[in-house]
Structure formats: structure tokens, C-alpha cells
Amino acid sequence: MKDIGLVGVAFSGKSTLFTALTRTGGHGGQANRAVVPVPDARLGVLTEMERSRKTVHAQVAFVDVPGGTSSAQGIAKLREADALAIVVRSFGPDTSPAAELEEVRADLLLADQVIVESALERARKSARRQATEVDALEKANAALAAETPLRAGGLSTDEVHLLRALAPLTLKPEVVVANLEEGTDVPPDLPDSAVGVYASIEAETAEMDPGEARVLLDEFGVHEPGLDKVIRAGYGALDLITFLTTGEDETRAWEVRRGAKAPEAAGVIHTDLERGFIRAEVIGYDDLVAAGSMDAAKAKGLVRVEGKEYVVREGDVLHVRFAV
Ligand SMILES: Nc1nc2c(ncn2[C@@H]2O[C@H](COP(=O)(O)OP(=O)(O)OP(=O)(O)O)[C@@H](O)[C@H]2O)c(=O)[nH]1
Ligand SMILES: [Mg+2]
């Protein structure tokens, strides 16, 4: 499971958003890590279609990082995250969410500059230095000096690989979350991809009976709550795809690295399935729904047989054949 670190200036509402997330049916372990199910409408459809006894969602974890970018401890925690969600304040008096976003991004750039510069110095002095490493660090250093996040720095796969050990913050995928005043929308000067949430009221309503929550949210002018959007956007920013399995026992969403081949995906379900992988029977979600059921899809010859080289796609419904 992947971790998304919440980052933002003081009082932007990170902890309030975190509380709202923990109440959506999340069952966190530690106090500052909320494990939440990723909303996925396809699961309900397949569950009904195959009359599955159980429905299991993919999960993602949000981490509330005390101190944020203002402390070394906060920065260190954020380095452990797989993606960052930048929370900007868009409620209360004197809001300037776009300026806040720039402030946070500048902090992230600065934090990376510090580690890249010192790594570069060390690499240059080292007797065992490798030209490729020095080159990668120099390229990263130049990007950061030009205020370009490393993810947009034109680094090759190998260079990114060399930098991974430093866990640079600006290499991580990022989503922007506007914490909104009730009755308002995402301000137009934020990126188009920014999602809005009403953290305060959504924290209050997350545990209510859905009908009661609806009434209260309507009263506050919140017609489309944002928590689900935040979770989907966060999950979506990670370099993952979701594949599905369905049957009488359960309908389930699984996550795997984008670009993974069928045996690796099978291994997410169980290591035996990867070790003993023979083939996968595959149908895209839309094709399956159009066919009406797995049996109907098989009867129509719509279920493909794929081998070890097949690259799994978003929304594939898989059935793995294996022998151990
Ligand atoms: N009106 C309103 N108030 C909010 C909202 N979200 C947070 N607040 C209030 O803003 C204050 C700061 O919220 P926190 O969630 O503690 O902010 P934070 O980002 O965790 O702050 P630090 O941990 O200090 O960096 C609290 O008093 C919250 O009640 C919101 O959506 N609407
Ligand atoms: Mg906080």
C-alpha cells in the first residue's frame, strides 16, 4: 500500500482533512496514518453481476505530518511518502491559496536543493566517485536552481534511479487539495487538476447516517463532498493501475505498478500465483459489463488468454491459471 503525505502551511487544515479521512471507514494503524478504501464504482457493479459474497476495495494511506516543511523531522517524514498532497487554505479570511501553493512548492524545492547540493559535494570529493552519479546530481542541481521540480527536470530513468536514494520531495507525484469554505468552489487560480474538499464539515458528517449527512451538507451549501475526490486523486497520482478479480467469493480491486506484466500482477494476489503462473484469462471491465456476466463473456469468446509477456491494463478483470 502506498502512502500519501499531507503537506501545507500551518493551519491549512491538514489535520482536519486527516480526521475526515479516518472517519470514512478508514482503519488506521498509527495515530497519524489513515488507511482508507479507494472509492471505485466498478466494484459494486461486478459484485452484483457475479453475486459476490464480499467486496474488497484497494487501499491507500494518508499521513498527517506534524510540523510539515518547517521542521527537519517533518521533511524526513515526507521523504518516506510515495506522493504528496499539498493542502491549501481556501476558507476563512484573507485566503490566498495560489500563493500558499507556491510557498509550499518553494519549501519542497529548497529541501531538495539542500540534499542534492550536499550529495553533489560528497560525490565530487569521493575517491570512488562515478561520473554517472556526479552527472545526475549536477543535472538535478541545475533543475532545482531553475526552480524546476525534479519530476519535470528531464531526468532519464537511470538518473532518476540514482537519485532515488536521496528520496527527493519534488520527484514525488503531487496533488493539490483546496480546503474550501462551504458554498465555494476551487479557486480558478489553482491548477485545473486541483480538487476541493470541505474538510471541516466533511469531518463532522463522515460518521453520520448518509441521509442525515446529506441534509446537513445541503444546509451548508455543500452539494458535492470532496473526500472521495481527494482519495481518488491521491491514488490516481501514484504510478499504479487497478486490476480486478471477480467471482462468487469476492470482487476485489488490486493495485500494481504501471507497466507490470501478468505474472507480477498475479503475484500481488498471491506469490504462488506468480511462481506457478501459467496464463491469465483477461477481459476489460467495460467489455465484461457489456457482456452481462463472466459466463456470458466466456460463451461469446470475449475472454482472452494472455501469457507471461502480457502488460496488464487499467480495469482488466483477471483470472489467473497457475500450478505449484
Ligand atoms: N471554517 C473552516 N475551518 C477549518 C477548516 N479546516 C480546518 N479549519 C480550522 O482551521 C484550524 C487549523 O486546522 P488544522 O486542521 O489543525 O490545520 P493544520 O494544517 O493541521 O495545521 P498545523 O498542523 O498547525 O500545520 C482549526 O481551527 C480548524 O478547525 C474548514 O474547512 N473550514
Ligand atoms: Mg496539523
Image: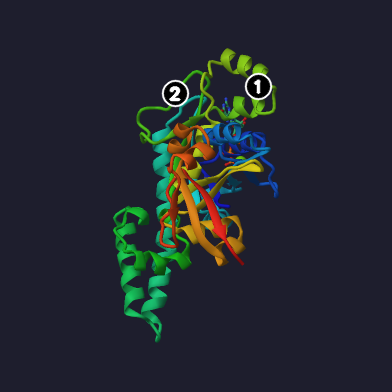
**Is residue 76 visible to the viewer in this orientation of the structure?**
no
Name the residue at 32% across, 79% down.
131
Name the residue at 62% across, 37% down.
21
Q: Secondary structure at mark 2?
A: loop
**Amino acid type at image mark 2:** Asp
- 19 vs 82, left or right, is right
The residue where tag 2 is placed is 185
Marks 1 and 2, Cα distance to the nearest angstrom?
A: 22 Å
Q: Nearer the viewer, residue 217 or 288?
A: 288
Q: Earlier in the sequence, mark 1 or mark 2?
A: 2
Looking at the picture, how far across and down is residue 274, in whole percent? Answer: 55, 63
Q: Secondary structure at mark 1?
A: helix
Does mark 1's beta carbon lie closer than 8 Å to ligand 1? no
- 261 vs 216, left or right, is left
Colour scheme used in the picture? rainbow
Q: Quadrant of residue 6?
A: top right
Does mark 2's beta carbon lie closer than 8 Å to ligand 1? no
Looking at the picture, how far across and down is residue 152, in whole percent? Answer: 32, 53
Tag 2: Cα neighbours inside 10 Å, few (<14), some, or many (≥20)? some
- 114 vs 318, left or right, is left
Q: Quadrant of residue 101?
A: top left
Number of marks in the image? 2
Furthest residue toward bottom: 127
* Location of residue 240 with respect to 126 vertically, above or below: above
Q: Nearer the viewer, residue 296 or 235?
A: 296
**Amino acid type at image mark 1:** Pro
Does the residue at mark 1 contact the one at mark 2 (Cβ under 8 Å)? no
The residue where tag 1 is placed is 210
Mark 1 or 2, closer to the camera:
1
Furthest residue toward front: 299
Looking at the picture, how far across and down is residue 272, in whole percent? Answer: 61, 63
